[in-house]
């Protein structure tokens, strides 16, 4: 049995970033940039008016100063002349400043009379000019570490890119195993239950930016499981669910070995999730999850999500943790790192009384997992503990 940290390092060593693909800008939100983008032009490309009013040549002109309006500049329609001393151009927000202009005065600060304007008693000094290149200049690089957000998409558009190089979504093949499993909506026969883990994990993987390929359930025979591995070919990561323990019908390790598995580890000092394995099968990274529903979801948070982050080009990292005070006392922990389903309350974080690894109803009510180190001493209400938020998992 190895420590969680060690197991995670070995899982992350199995995977690497996926290649790049080019997508239309409209499809790029939420994707991970595969290479820095550079602005193709300056923004704004010219000195632009930030107010509707008049462009004048005199930066210091005060109340009573008069100018003759000789032309007009609107957004998309520059004035094709220049203004000289005593001259002004009518100008609108977003228009290019005509040559010779030093400043824009707001139309509210001007009295107009035919083609003449007189600056009023109170004139906002301005200058109400947005200088060329003040947002970015040609060649400016953009390389966010996070998935592209709406504001990023607007910036990329403004930089002049109709398409975006992004990481290919990593494809994860999910193989649920077990003769007891039927699909949701089917009626279980004697001794059977409804399969749930693959659905939860597929949702988790797709929320993180991967593509889940949920394969048909493998029966508890070597031939069926081997066929499932065949169907998983081409995936970036193969995840098996169940059949990981030591029972006579737990076939995953055996079948993986007959297919030449290079094992990175088997069994981790964590609860739930002890009978976890990982390695490489048919050249593809593989993670074998325990079948207990909460075990498989917790292992998803602790191992699969970090693996997806690496495949999407992120740095190796474990699930983000933050400290919170305990709302209620906890008993001493055993020898495994314990991930306890918990609720976040105004008083702090409170572990649920029932922590059995089959209880999905408790997982669904949980906001967070309290992470307790192996052999952690008994804790009192108010003591600080580390938690992993489940809201984004
Ligand atoms: N003698 C021992 N027995 C067990 C040990 C052990 O160390 N020694 N470890 C226990 C622990 S901890 C776990 S976790 C389980 C994991 O066993 P498996 O990975 O072999 O899982 P299964 O036996 O296939 O299933 C366990 C449980 O989960 C249900 N299951 C499986 N797949 C799904 C699915 N896709 N959706 C919903 N539920 C699923 C299955 O029906 C079982 O009830 O082993 C302990 N035993
Ligand atoms: O490791 Mo098991 O996942 O505790 O139920």
Image (cartoon, grey):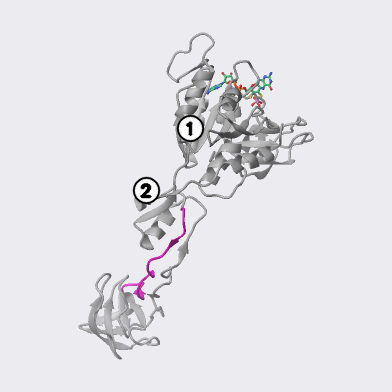
The answer to whether mark 1 is within 8 Å of ligand 1 is no
| Magenta-drawn stretch contains 249 | no
- In reply to whether residue 49 is colored magenta, the answer given is yes
Give the x, y percent position of residue 228: 48, 25
Q: Position of residue 82 (x, y in %)?
A: 27, 85
Q: Which residue is mark 1?
A: 173
Q: Looking at the image, which is closer to me, 78 or 63?
A: 78
Q: Quadrant of the C terminus?
A: top right
Boundaries of the magenta span: 34-52
Q: Residue at label 2?
A: 27
Respond yes or no on whether mark 2 lies under 8 Å from ligand 1. Answer: no
Q: Quadrant of the N terminus?
A: top right
Quadrant of picture, ligand 1: top right
Residue at the spot x=41%, y=60% of the render? 155
Going by the image, does 88 lie left or right of 2?
Answer: left
Upstream in the sequence, badge 2 or badge 1? 2
Badge nearest the viewer, 2 or 1: 1
Decide which of 314, 197 is in the foreground and name it. Answer: 314
Task: For residue 91, say whether it is visible.
Answer: yes
Q: Secondary structure at mark 2?
A: helix
């Amino acid at each position: 049995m190895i420590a969680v940290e060690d197991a995670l390092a070995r899982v992350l060593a199995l995977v690497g970033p996926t290649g790049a693909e080019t997508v239309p800008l409209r499809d790029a939100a939420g994707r991970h940039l595969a290479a820095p983008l550079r602005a193709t032009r300056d923004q704004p490309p010219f000195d632009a008016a930030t107010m509707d009013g008049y462009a004048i040549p005199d930066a210091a002109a005060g109340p009573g100063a008069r100018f003759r309006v000789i032309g007009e500049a609107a957004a998309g329609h520059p004035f094709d002349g220049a203004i000289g001393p005593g001259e002004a151009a009518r100008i609108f927000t977003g228009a290019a400043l005509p040559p010779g202009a030093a400043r824009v005065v707001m139309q509210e600060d001007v009295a107009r009379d035919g083609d003449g304007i007189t600056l009023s008693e109170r004139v906002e000094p301005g200058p109400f000019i947005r200088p060329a290149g003040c947002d970015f200049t040609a060649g400016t690089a953009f390389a966010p570490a996070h998935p592209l957000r709406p504001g990023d998409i607007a910036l990329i558009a403004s930089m002049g890119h109709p398409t975006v190089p992004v990481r290919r979504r990593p494809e994860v093949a999910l193989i649920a195993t077990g003769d007891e499993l039927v699909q949701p909506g089917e009626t279980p026969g004697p001794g059977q239950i409804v399969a749930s883990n693959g659905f939860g994990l597929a949702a988790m993987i797709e929320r993180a930016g991967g593509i889940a390929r949920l394969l048909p359930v493998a029966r508890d025979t070597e031939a069926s499981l081997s066929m499932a591995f065949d169907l998983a070919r081409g995936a970036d990561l193969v995840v098996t669910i169940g059949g990981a323990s030591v029972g006579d019908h737990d076939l995953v390790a055996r079948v993986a070995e007959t297919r030449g598995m290079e094992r990175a580890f088997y069994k981790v000092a964590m609860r739930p999730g002890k009978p976890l394995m990982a390695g490489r099968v048919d050249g593809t990274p593989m993670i074998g999850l325990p079948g207990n529903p909460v075990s498989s979801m917790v292992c998803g948070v602790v191992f699969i999500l970090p693996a997806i982050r690496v495949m999407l080009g992120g740095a190796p990292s474990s699930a983000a943790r933050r400290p919170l005070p305990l709302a209620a006392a906890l008993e001493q922990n055993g020898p495994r790192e314990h991930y306890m389903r918990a609720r976040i309350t105004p008083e702090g974080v409170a572990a649920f009384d029932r922590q059995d690894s089959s209880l999905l109803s408790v997982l669904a009510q949980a906001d967070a997992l309290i992470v307790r180190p192996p052999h952690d001493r008994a804790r009192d209400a108010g003591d600080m503990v580390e938690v992993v938020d489940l809201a984004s998992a």
